[in-house]
Amino acid sequence: MSKFILIKKKIDTFKKKTLSIPGDKSISIRFILLSSLTKGKCTAYNLLDSDDVTSAIESVKKLGIKIIQKKFKCEIHGKGLFGFKYRKNLILNAGNSGTTARLICSTLIDAEYPVKVIGDKSLSMRDMKRITKPLKLFGIKLKDNNGRLPILIKGSKFTKPISYIENLGSAQCKSAVMIAALKTFGVTKIKSLPSRNHTELMFKNVLKVPIKIKNKKKYDYIEIKGKNEIAPFNYKIPGDISSASFFIVLTLLSKNSKLILKNVNINPSRIGIIKILNMMGAKIKFLKKKKYYGELVGDILVKSATTLKAINLNSSLNSSAIDEFLLIFLVASKCEGVSSFVKLSELNKKESKRLDWGIKILKMMNIKTRKIKNNGIKIWGNKNFQKNKNYIIKDYLKDHRIFMVATIAALSLGGNWKIYDPNSFKTSFPTFLKLLTKLGAKINE
């Protein structure tokens, strides 16, 4: 593949289409890490085939776990809670995956020898204090690079349960504490701001871990009783709502178009973008809803939007839409009126500074945009906005979501686009461009 793609023509319309979205990345990585702690063979169907998931697989293999990958399934042969094989000078490379880096650290709290966890340039710039701080409380030895990777972990046979308050609304931080609790005798207690709850659902409904969960208005309260062996399990992973969101927005911004996305994870903690877009005038519907191991799964029906209205969004939906805000900014650029969004500091702690990049791209397209107090953004929408200029998108630390949002902007708004680092989307969505061509996209690679 070349260093960039070229898009010179937007998609005008596509009649009723149906797409299947690859497996949920968050659940795929959790399946790999948690199944490696069971005692027996676990099988996943529709496991996401991406660079981030491969990083998790290769890391677990280095810990002595047998993994067999086939065309439609992945088998992981766990050796129990304390079955990892540790050796001297072991290095685990999380690549670009923040989920892999943060959650695999929590599985290493019994490491016999120091284990080094590393990542690529982008991941090495991201905050790891959110997991190193609570993990140290379990009684392990841990060194990091001023709160960043690489992290060196030396475990303990005598870890102790902790009580921890998670005030960032970070599912990865919460999950790291929960997974560490599995290897700790006693009851670990967590008071956490609401965030994605895939780990809680897997603990309760799949792993049958002794866990208590109370969901209050402002906080979730979780208690986990550790050192209980976990039985093997099978899991059919639903489609990823974050990946589906790119096609949802493309459909909204295209004329006379209709799309059904099959078997997508519509967990309430992940559908903030749907709620926000419907508040802006979209009419997105869920069809054939069903529960699967506690996760809500269904088809998503989306049609072109005739009128989109500006929104002043409070921060209550931020955590459930944090990975989709660049798409929401793009929709806001086509709304009637001025939209504002606040408390988005987490966006600048992702693979790149996404809040800053969102502002940069919109200004590049001559959309009036301003960064406001409280880590917010204000966008002056233009419903008749269409572009015929030349645009170049590059130097964004190969952030997969920057690449994909720029692609959707090109296909929905028009103009001549040169978008660099196409390999970046392979971290989360390797079939992205292929699925776009099914909707009529003309992309020169």
Image (cartoon, helix red, strand yellow):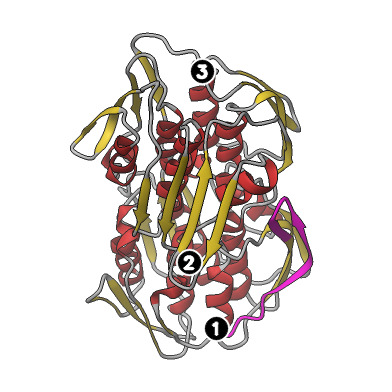
Above or below, comparing residue 376 to residue 77 in the picture: below
> Can residue 183 be seen in the rendering of this structure?
yes
Query: Closer to the camera, 146 or 377?
Result: 146
C-alpha separation, residue under disc 3 versus residue under disc 1: 48 Å
Numbered tag placed on residue 149 in the rendering:
none
Say which element carries label 1: helix
Q: Residues within 10 Å of mark 3 (few under 14, many from 20)?
A: many
Foreground disc of the pair 2, 1:
1
User: Residue 354 is drawn in which quadrant?
Assistant: bottom left
The residue indicated by pointer 1 is 279
The residue indicated by pointer 2 is 327
Asked if the residue at tag 1 contacts the one at tag 3, i.e. Cβ–Cβ closer than 8 Å, the answer is no
Say which element carries label 2: helix
For the point 35% across and 9% down, the residue is 88
Q: Is residue 139 left or right of residue 294?
A: left
Query: Closer to the camera, 225 or 438?
Result: 225
Above or below, comparing residue 388 to residue 134 in the picture: below
